[in-house]
Image: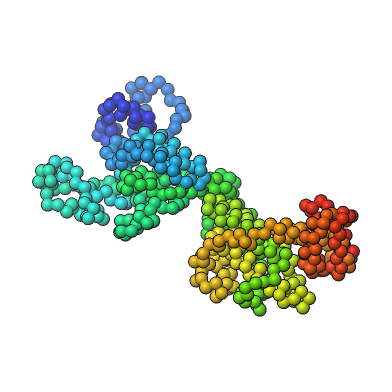
């Protein structure tokens, strides 16, 4: 045979097959005088013989496609062998029906499975000629050739080691048996994982976890794992193996090509882990791209994840320090506008992250959490409440406790949402700061946070956004003028442009005063001169130093 097309043609026209190569790649007796030579040697010998006989017309190089071993690139020769098959193609309609009912992440992956099932032109070959794999529990009667299949109670059994547990051949009475020496395709084992994970065949109640809620897999094994799971479970249990299927893309090398040792674009995970830790690496994997797409490995992404963890760690240290005299035991807190602002945003974050994770959109969840923790909590809120935390004699104990409560609550929420992506650092912070109070043995054993709609407050968010924008713009001006951020402002005049915005800013007067170190603040409802507060076109301020 040259290739698979030859095999099909021979089968179609029922042509006789003369096998002249053995399993060691040598010519056998059918090759006549060439018997015993390797394929390469035989080719040379035949050319010599043709030359000698004067039958050789010409020698030239031609291009042809040759199937090769994926590992060592040795050309493949097709040999005729009897094989065991599973009759899979009779299930194709059913596979399509189930595939359409299953939820796929991303959705279009279902067609990869359906198209594959429909394109198959032979059944699944389940036997392999290998030394090591799961044995095929079958014997043949030496006398009449009858096939003897092991009873379920005999399993596990290796026919090459043990005899069948019967006295004689049921057909001819012979007591001599020949074991099946072929072994099973490795996918025969992998194709029952959904049932096995659920407890089959040992647990009676295995159906409570079957079909699996989610089968997580890769784009390269839809044709094998996703497909074989499907046909096998349909055949055994008349039921689909999984309710939803997550198909991940491939990790590409740093140059965007398939990772390969020979291309030199190969990065060992152990190298990444030892340099930046698993939590940073997991952030790259979660945030690297839309689910299902291939993602190149990028050191800068891992490093960014690592820097985020440092930021989070430092924020947790700060919060922990500020909570030394705090017990989360009060019913009501004197929540200030910025407290309500971030508590509301934390609820919205919870809603978005939960939805993203439910839909296996890990990159969206990752971006939302990081953006919130880094910018909303660290850059904005923590900076804006420092004065309140440091000077209870000015603002009052009540307002300090409100800030403490808010920090305690918001950081815990971030840890909960981040726990699936960065399991180690979240657990470490949880154990240090929260375990005693919350009572869960691990953050990974705590319930997923439910969204509290009562804490969602559009008004608080709107005015909080404005207050934060004013604070940020004042700090930006100081930075541009190369002044230390704690430089005192003698008088800060804020032009709100309209009454509503002036009222919003008024609610943040204390936070603005404290954070901007302003001795005096004047909030004016009309429009005026000064530096623009982005993105509020009509809000401007003048700071007199
Ligand atoms: Zn090979
Ligand atoms: Zn027999």
Locate the N terminus by quadrant: top left
The percent coordinates of residue 397 (x first, y second) are 72, 77
As displayed, is residue 177 above or below residue 200?
above
As displayed, is residue 374 above or below residue 141?
below
Relative placement, left or right, of 113 versus 155 is right
Residue in the image at 71% along x and 58% along y = 459
- Nearer to us in this view, 189 or 432: 432
Q: Where, by quadrant of the figure, is residue 47 drawn?
A: top left
The answer to whether residue 292 shows anywhere in this view is yes
Relative placement, left or right, of 266 versus 467 is left
As displayed, is residue 382 above or below residue 75?
below
Q: Where, by quadrant of the figure, is residue 324 drawn?
A: bottom right
Residue in the image at 77% along x and 64% along y = 507
The percent coordinates of residue 506 (x first, y second) are 80, 63
Q: Where, by quadrant of the figure, is residue 313 drawn?
A: bottom right
- Nearer to us in this view, 96 or 268: 96
Display coloring: rainbow
Locate the C terminus by quadrant: bottom right
Total marks in image: 0
Relative placement, left or right, of 17 versus 349 is left
The answer to whether residue 128 shows anywhere in this view is no
Relative placement, left or right, of 75 versus 408 is left
The percent coordinates of residue 71 (x first, y second) are 43, 45
The percent coordinates of residue 519 (x first, y second) are 86, 70
- Nearer to us in this view, 199 or 38: 199
Residue in the image at 39% along x and 51% along y = 211
Q: Quadrant of ligand 2?
A: top left
């Amino acid at each position: 045979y040259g290739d698979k097309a030859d095999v099909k043609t021979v089968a179609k026209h029922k042509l006789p097959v003369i096998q002249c190569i053995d399993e060691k790649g040598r010519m056998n007796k059918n090759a006549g005088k060439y018997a015993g030579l390797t394929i390469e040697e035989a080719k040379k010998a035949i050319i010599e013989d043709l030359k000698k006989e004067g039958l050789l017309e010409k020698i030239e190089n031609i291009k042809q496609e040759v199937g090769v071993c994926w590992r060592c690139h040795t050309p493949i020769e097709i040999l005729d062998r009897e094989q065991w098959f599973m009759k899979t193609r009779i299930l194709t309609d059913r596979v399509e029906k189930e595939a359409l009912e299953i939820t796929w992440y991303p959705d279009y992956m279902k067609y990869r499975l359906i198209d594959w099932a429909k394109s198959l032109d032979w059944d699944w070959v389940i036997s392999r000629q290998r030394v090591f794999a799961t044995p095929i529990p079958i014997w043949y009667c030496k006398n009449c050739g009858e096939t003897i299949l092991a009873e379920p109670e005999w399993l596990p059994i290796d026919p090459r080691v043990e005899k069948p547990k019967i006295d004689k051949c049921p057909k001819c009475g012979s007591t001599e048996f020949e074991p099946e020496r072929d072994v099973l395709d490795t996918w025969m084992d992998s194709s029952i994982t959904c049932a096995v994970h659920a407890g089959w065949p040992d647990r009676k109640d295995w159906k409570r976890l079957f079909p699996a809620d989610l089968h997580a897999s890769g784009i390269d094994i839809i044709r094998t794992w996703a497909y074989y799971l499907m046909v096998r479970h349909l055949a055994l249990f008349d039921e689909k193996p999984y309710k939803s299927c997550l198909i991940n893309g491939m990790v590409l090398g740093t140059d965007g090509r398939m990772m390969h040792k020979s291309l030199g674009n190969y990065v060992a995970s152990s190298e990444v882990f030892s340099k930046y830790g698993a939590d940073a690496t997991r952030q790259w994997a979660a945030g690297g791209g839309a689910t299902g797409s291939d993602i190149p490995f990028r050191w800068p992404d891992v490093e960014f994840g690592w820097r985020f963890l440092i930021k989070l760690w430092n924020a947790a240290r700060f919060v922990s320090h500020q909570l030394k005299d705090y017990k989360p035991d009060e019913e009501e807190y004197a929540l200030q506008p910025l407290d309500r602002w971030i508590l509301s945003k934390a609820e919205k974050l919870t809603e978005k992250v939960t939805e993203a994770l439910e839909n296996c959109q890990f990159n969206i969840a990752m971006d939302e959490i990081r953006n919130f923790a880094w910018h909303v909590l660290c850059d904005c809120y923590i900076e804006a409440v420092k004065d309140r935390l440091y000077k209870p004699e000015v603002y009052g104990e009540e307002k300090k406790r409100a800030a403490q409560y808010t920090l305690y609550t918001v950081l815990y929420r971030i840890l909960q949402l981040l726990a699936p992506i960065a399991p180690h650092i979240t657990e470490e912070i949880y154990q240090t700061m929260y375990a005693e109070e919350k009572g869960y043995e691990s953050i990974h054993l705590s319930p997923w946070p439910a969204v509290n709609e009562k804490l969602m407050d559009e008004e608080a968010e709107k005015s909080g956004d404005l207050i934060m924008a004013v604070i940020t713009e004042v700090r930006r001006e100081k930075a541009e003028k190369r002044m230390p951020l704690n430089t005192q402002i003698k008088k800060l005049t804020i032009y709100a442009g309209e009454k509503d915005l002036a009222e919003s800013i008024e609610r943040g007067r204390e936070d603005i005063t404290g954070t901007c170190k302003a001795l005096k603040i004047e909030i004016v409802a009309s429009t005026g001169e000064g530096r623009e507060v982005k993105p509020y076109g009509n809000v401007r301020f003048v700071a007199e130093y």
